[in-house]
Image: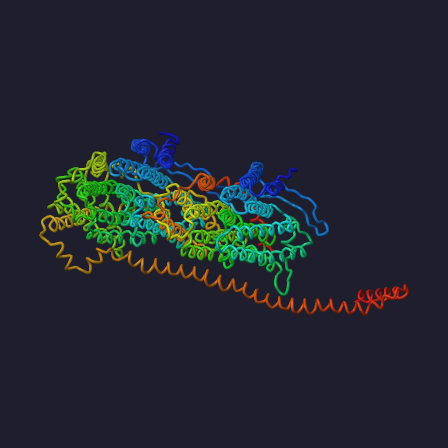
Amino acid sequence: MTGNMFINYSLLILFLPVAAFTIQIFIGKRLPRQGDWVSIGAVIITLVLAIAMFASMLFGHDPNFSQEASFTWLDMGVFKIELGFLVDNITITMLLVVALISTMTHIFSLKYMEGDIRYSRYYAYLGLFTFSMNGIVLANNLISMYMFWELVGVSSYLLIGHWYEKDSASDAAKKAFLTNRVGDIGFFIGILLIFSSLGTFVFSEIYDGIAAGQLGGTVLTFAGIGLFLGAMGKSSQFPLHIWLPDAMEGPTPVSALMHAATMVAAGVYLVVRLFPLFTPDALLVIAYVGGFTALFAATIAVTQNDIKKVLAYSTVSQLGYMILSVGTGAYIAGFFHLVTHAMFKACLFYGSGSVIHSMHHALDKKHDHKTDPQDMRNMGGFKKKMPITYWAMLICTLAISGVPLFSGFLSKDAILAGTLSFASQNPGHFLLPVFGFGAAAITAFYMFRLMIMTFHGKPQMPEIYDDIHESPKEMTFPLVVLSSLSIFIFYTLPYFNPFSDEGWFSEMIVASDSVVPGNETAHYIAEGIHHVHYYAMALSLIVAALGIFLSWTMYFKKKISADGWAKKLKPIYNLSFNKYFFDENYNQYLYQPFLKLSNLVAYIDWDLYDKYFINGFGRVTKLFSFFTGRLDYDGLDQTIIDGIGRSTRRAGGVLKYLQTGRLQSYLLFALLGVILLVLFQSF
Amino acid sequence: METNILSWIIWIPLLGMAAIAFVPRGKTKAIKIITAVATGVQFLATLGLLSQFDLSTGGFQFMERATWIPSFNITYILGVDGLSLPMVILTGLLFFLSTFVSWNINRAVKGYFSLFLLLDIGIMGVFLSLDFFLFYVFWEVMLLPMFFLIGMWGGPQREYAAIKFFLYTLVGSVLMLIAILALYFTCGRTFDMLLLMETAPTALNGVMWWGMSAIKVIWVLLFIGFAIKVPVFPFHTWLPLAHVEAPTAISVILAGILLKLGIYGMLRINYSMLPGAVWWFAGALAVLGLINVIWGAMCALAQKDLKKLVAYSSVNHMGYILIGMSAVIAAGAANGNNVLAAQAGLGGAVFLMFNHGTISAMLFILVGVIYERAHHRDIEGFGGLATRMPIYSGIVALAFFAGLGLPGFSGFISEAMCFIGAFPVFKGIVIASTIGILLNATYFLWAFQRIFLGTLNEKYKDLPEINRMELFTVIPLAVITLFLGIYPKPFLDLISSTMNVIIDTVANVSSFAGVF
């Protein structure tokens, strides 16, 4: 591909889904099959285009490839906004990830959403999401990034709230949007700080400005933290993590696409994209938030019984990993994990969807609408019934746990090496690798807990067990594709070493140097990582093995009683089980007081200020008018005016005697008048 | 270029009124059609104006001048520039659409539409007149039909609302009149606004009245006069009441255009004639903007009546405009000649003026639709309507998202520009007011959830879907909002020359020492 082909292809990839969205919204319902083929056709074309771009990236073999195109969006003379697109290797890879997962989700939904009351709406919103997500990926400037960022938020709102008849779904949708907006305030302030110093929104120009020293120090730190706040919202980082688990109210394929693989990765993508502008202080904030989230969310996932909730907290935790790696400077590792995680986490969600779908049908058959089809305590022994789902999920579980031969091992290892290297250079920050390795152990533990509770052991509900079936082809196909893509080889080609992340990815996607003066160079960071690489690998293997072993003895062999330990650690267990009471506390100490305050403000405005103060003017005026009225009528009119009338009459009675009819006297009066006038004038 | 197009635009409704006068009382359809034709022709004429408008100049175009009362130097001067043109087009559009929003009016139809057209004349006149006396006459002409339209065709508390609106605005008018007379007597006994824009900035320098700077006194008088219209906190309480009680079409005009008259007045008169005081007042303007944003949003959050919520959202949005307006001083030497920020702020403010016109009009029409069907507007009293009225709820969702400043709709970029512009000068205030980004979303989404989501309220299982006539009134507004949100350049091209004139006026004065 030459010239602007990359840009042209990208524009097609960007706009095809929104075209599908428009068609679906207006005439979707009237089309055969409610128009699902329109949406699917559109995403498949984007997938083909993305593959073509990806292939030419591989064959072009230029790690520094980059193309930009922009147009004037508004222009007032000096104030000008240019919107544009940036296509480089990170973009191309990301476009492929989005197109692939989006296509898989479209296909998976064919059966999963079959017969849904708003089937065409559902596909419409998927198109809107794909469009917005690609918009984020392609942005070369902060304004269009922010715009698509918000649009992603809306598509998420619409899809989480797809079954809005349920209050829990509409609550979750609103919560997702508003929590994201909290982060977006930070994002926007970050944009303001950068723009007011540099006068540009375009990434490359921002980097030039920072390199030239036009922006730096505390302001840049705050700008970076502001932008990162946006990422915290979207990527569900502590303490804005509360919306993602609730977002599981949306249909499961949506959870796979948005709340596992792509949308929530947008935050990570943002900090990866903008890595060169973060100051060391901002990076430290990023590292700690990410690291803490990784561990914190993992500790919640351990005790959850809802299969999707486990995966949701696992996603929060894995996103924390990616953020952590950006903070430590090994941001390419974070992006690598974003890609591998997209595959295996989407696959895990499809797997859970497949299980839930099956449970749902089985329960339906028994007319049981009370049992929760997502509760793992109602499952067990599904391995025999759903072999494809089982094996696909197992591969992905191995991948997420960091077992060699699978993709997660490579990317997780790279992140952990990054934290270890960072801590060895800055021993004060020893907590970062503790977060990382700790979370790794817990991840392996809860993922195997999930697998064993769902697929092994005895069926917990024997009465429905016979009705549990493998899902149809439309649903198993994405499982097979994505679980295959969780095998190491797809990331290491043309090499075959399962223990080294060397391959097309490491060759094509290279770290750029930070533009902040004084920050470490990409080379220096890479050297450090190289140095600790083997320790990190050994350590990560040990913690993964530990987690898996513990899970295996506890849930498979039942050598250790999970319930017993839960009782022994009651307070800690309760904290974890109740997600550290974040929702309750936010509700009690933030939402409710604010709502009360708003009610108070409205009361002051309407019932006090307006009623008494403003209307007070009216009342005072009325009172005043009453008196003036009295004065006017009784005083002025009746007494003075009428009095004048009366006196005039009387005067007339007197003055008539002046009417003498004699010309001399009239002349005399006129003369007197003139004299009086002259006298007045002279004063 | 000799043309009378501006006079035609102002007086076309008068022809409509004359025609209506000859129609028998009972022929309501004919009256409505006449109004539609009159406003439609007027709207087309404003579009004609747009097509002939010269973007390269910031001065007045299509000028008309005629002697009127020469003994007092009162002249009939009309003209249009980049500040008034968008508002003229918006007025044309909203009056045309509001005619159809009023289609269900069936009480005293003749009176209603006559007053409606009179209101149209008043508003167009204010935007187009360049003689202060004429301006004031039109300003007062507007007040009268508004009073009757709210007071006779309004809701249960209509009389109270009408009288409150009338008195409140009258106070503003009186203050404005004093200011106009003060300018008249101090600046060479003229009402010619073009002349005043040249002479007033310097003629008043150093003039003191009762120990106060004349510029400041006149500025404050004018500001309060206009602030009541905007409305700026704490002069805002007439607005929710008038909105709630007014018939739908009148709420549309109120929110869509009348509020903008205040902003227009400030920019046309305060900014252009007393640019020195902009420097003195910009900080206060930004603070008032912040208060409007937060106070309006919190009040909106607490409302139970949907129409009142939308009304308070206007208070909230006017705050962003004030913040954007305060950015103009960035262009002064004292602020490092940051013309970029000034353009962003002022451009954003005027852009938002227009956008709020389309978005709030949409919101009020949509509130009217549900009120027409359910005969109440209690947010808590609905529930699950999305299942029953999918098209209506889709359009409401669109309008709400436009209202909460979602990118892709015109509200977003104009709000963002207000922030971007004011940020270099008023960092703290802008940062504090960005919380509005969150609050806007909160009150709109929460209201949406309570009305449309959840299980369908059994009471409303037969509620009819939005009809064609209603769709016809909303869709043009939605299209404009979307178009300008996706591609704002045409609009900003339209206004930027004039914005630069205003910015220059304010920026240049900063070099004057001892203005006060």
Position of A56 compared to B466: left or right?
A: left
- Decide which of A417, A184 is in the foreground and name it: A184
Position of A326 compared to A81: left or right?
A: left
Counting labels gives 0
* Image spot of residue B45 (x, y percent): 58, 38
Is the residue A13 above or below the residue B25 in the image?
Answer: above
* Image spot of residue B296 (x, y percent): 45, 55
* Image spot of residue A627 (x, y percent): 60, 68
- Is residue B499 something that shows in the picture? no
Q: Quadrant of residue A64?
A: top left
In the rendered view of the protein, which quadrant contains the C terminus of chain A? bottom right
- Decide which of A569, B84 is in the foreground and name it: B84
- Is residue B205 something that shows in the picture? yes
- Decide which of A466, A238 is in the foreground and name it: A466
Is the residue A309 above or below the residue B217 in the image?
Answer: above
Q: Quadrant of residue B184?
A: bottom right
> What's the colour scheme?
rainbow
Position of A267 compared to A213: left or right?
A: left
Farthest-out residue, top: A1
Q: Quadrant of residue A148?
A: top left
In the rendered view of the protein, which quadrant contains the N terminus of chain A? top left
